[in-house]
Amino acid sequence: MKKKRKLSLMTKRSITGYLFIMPWLIGFIWFYARSLFMSVQFSLSELTVNPGGGYTLDFKWFENYLYAFRVHPSFKQVLTSSLGNMLIDVPLIIFFSLFMALLLNKKFKGRTLVRAIFFLPVILNSGAIQAAMDLARNMMSGGISSASAEMAEAASSGVSVDYYIQMFSALGLPHEAIEYVSGAVSRISDIINASGVQIVIFIAALQSIPGSMYEVAKIEGATAYETFWKVTFPMVMPHIITNVVYTVIDSFADSEVVDLAYKTAFTYNNYGLSSVFSLVSTVVTCLVLVLVCGFIQKRTFYYN
Amino acid sequence: MAQSKEAKRSFKEWMNDMKADTQFANDRKRWMANTKKFILGLFKLIIIIGICYVILGPVIGMISKSFFSNADNYNPMVYLIPQNPTLERYQLSMKYLNYWQTMTSSLLYALTLMIIQVFICSMVGYGFARYKFPLKNVLFAMVVVMIVIPTHTIMLPLYMTFAKFDVLGAISLFTGNTINLLGTPVPMYILTAFGCGLRSGLYIYIFNQFFRGLPKEIEEAAFVDGAGTWYTYFRIMLVNALPSIVTVAIFSMVWQYNDTFYAKLFVISDDIVISKKISTIEASISNVERILDPAILEIYLDAGIVLVMIPVVLIYVIFQKQFIEGAERSGIVG
């Protein structure tokens, strides 16, 4: 008797749960799952668009896949290089944005303005505007754009990057580490532009930490360093996963693989091959995400 | 050599003297703390200003360029500050953008989608965060899959779906034909209302993470006090979720406003999506006004982009205050 009632409450709860996610569930099945299925179908066949609208599919098994991996001149190389760039950028962006969020979380004069400025790249990060901005950057002769200004300054003041690199390698630092750091420095403007959203998410996370925790830490005599690692960092941990997911996807959405897929579909009208590129790169990204998130999730602490 | 040794010794002695001196110990400590604070503050200031410059550099260049007259543009001595500033660029850009009308409808479009987005995604995120039901983990993995899959992958099928739109054959049963929804913003509304709009997956994820971080005691207390599920959700949980609602609202608004991909895919009219219209402004000005120098056309584009940027920047600055307030309020509650 008792057991039965408990079960019915459970079922009730699960029905309410389904009600909450219902709109998304319908949409997902209707639009996403169906479209994905169609994409897989496209990748397994040769698609010809009929002149009167609609299309016909010629089922060809794995011919497109075999072509992509065996014959296509650049696919494998583009895939690995996009993946490599992603793996290098993600930790840099996460640490940079956490650092900046910590800086911006403290109260100081003009904080609102600085935050608004940090969010600017996100506002400007859209197809049309970004393309126009790139054009504007290229066309600008004075060199106010960050990249050329940096170059001009470095050339005029005689600061030689090579000199420092040589110095550090003479000190016996590992070559890979030097390369990583110098690569990060040279891409600083990319990293800053890519971390606007992450900074905002981290700031929201930092502000949702109850102040009483810091009071307790202070009373117990924790230093600022200890407070960061024992209070701030664990509380921000769930948002690190959010940010990793976001960063990986964002850098993937702009990567060369997507470009290649887009070009294959619309310049060469090869929809089947384009679907193969998209699907393969999507699967690879999913694998990376699952591995990384599984790794972090084990170490994550949830408040409740 | 000897001198430096002497200096070193004297410095050591001086330090020892300082340490032995107990009379001004408090003063010394305060002085040290203040210096530390000052140096840290300076360091922070330098970092922040430097990064702000990297971000603002191209924007400043664009804004200053948009006031350049022809003579300024051809004069290599003019840098950043125009000698003969002109507002003509803005006038012409405004005219060709049909600015006020396009802007109003564009903002309205983004705002409507934002409201739907916040409503639906918070609900779904809450469902995933707080309820246990069969297949939950699989379904949540599907949310992640939705985030990960680039929209390019499903672009063609989506296009076909909305070109011949039908609800399980019901529409063609009654009217005898499927509806072509392309050319109208309706596909976007439908997609968003079913939680599949522009980056909906990400918003669901954000809400899910947020609700998981809230203490369960809030709902337990509401349940004990006799509040129903939906009452608890709308009157208690949503109020608690204000910081993440503001976050999602800003993202959704801005991205929707900037989005050209969906607008192009569903052939939504230029008069509704201003960020799509901006990409044609150069061509239309050069065709009608017979301005053929690309360097001059570039300036018109700069002016147009500044015009398009203004409302979003304003909205963000206004929301920013609410953002902080919401975050602080939740800090008191949680």
Image (cartoon, rainbow, N blue to C red):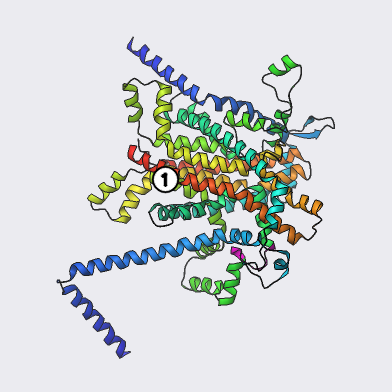
User: Residue B212 location in percent, x, y?
Assistant: 41, 34
**Kind of residue at disc 1:** Ile
User: Residue B262 location in percent, x, y?
Assistant: 66, 38
How many marks can you see?
A: 1
Is residue B19 found left or right of B245 in the rendered image? left
Is residue B152 found left or right of A208 in the rendered image? right
Furthest residue to the bottom? B2
Query: Is residue B152 visible to us here?
Result: no
Find disc 1 in the rendering and name its residue.
B324
Quadrant containing the C terminus of chain A in the rendered view: top left
User: Residue A262 location in percent, x, y?
Assistant: 71, 44
Is residue A264 found left or right of A213 in the rendered image? right
Chain of the residue where label 1 is placed in the rendered structure:
B
Q: Is residue A194 above or below residue B245?
A: below
Q: Nearer the viewer, residue B18 or B69?
A: B69
Q: Residue at x 50, y 63 (%)?
A: B50
Rendering quarter of residue A234? top left
Q: Is residue A187 above or below residue B199?
A: below
Magenta region, residue range: A139-147
Furthest residue to the top? A1
Judge the density around disc 1: few (<14), some (14-19), many (≥20) Cα neighbours within 10 Å: some
Quadrant containing the N terminus of chain A in the rendered view: top left
Q: Residue at x 23, y 67 (%)?
A: B29
Rendering quarter of residue B276? top right
Q: Nearer the viewer, residue B68 or A255?
A: B68
Q: Is residue A145 magenta?
A: yes
Q: Secondary structure at mark 1?
A: helix
> Magenta stretch mostly in which secondary structure?
loop
Q: Nearer the viewer, residue A127 or B242?
A: B242
Q: Is residue A261 magenta?
A: no
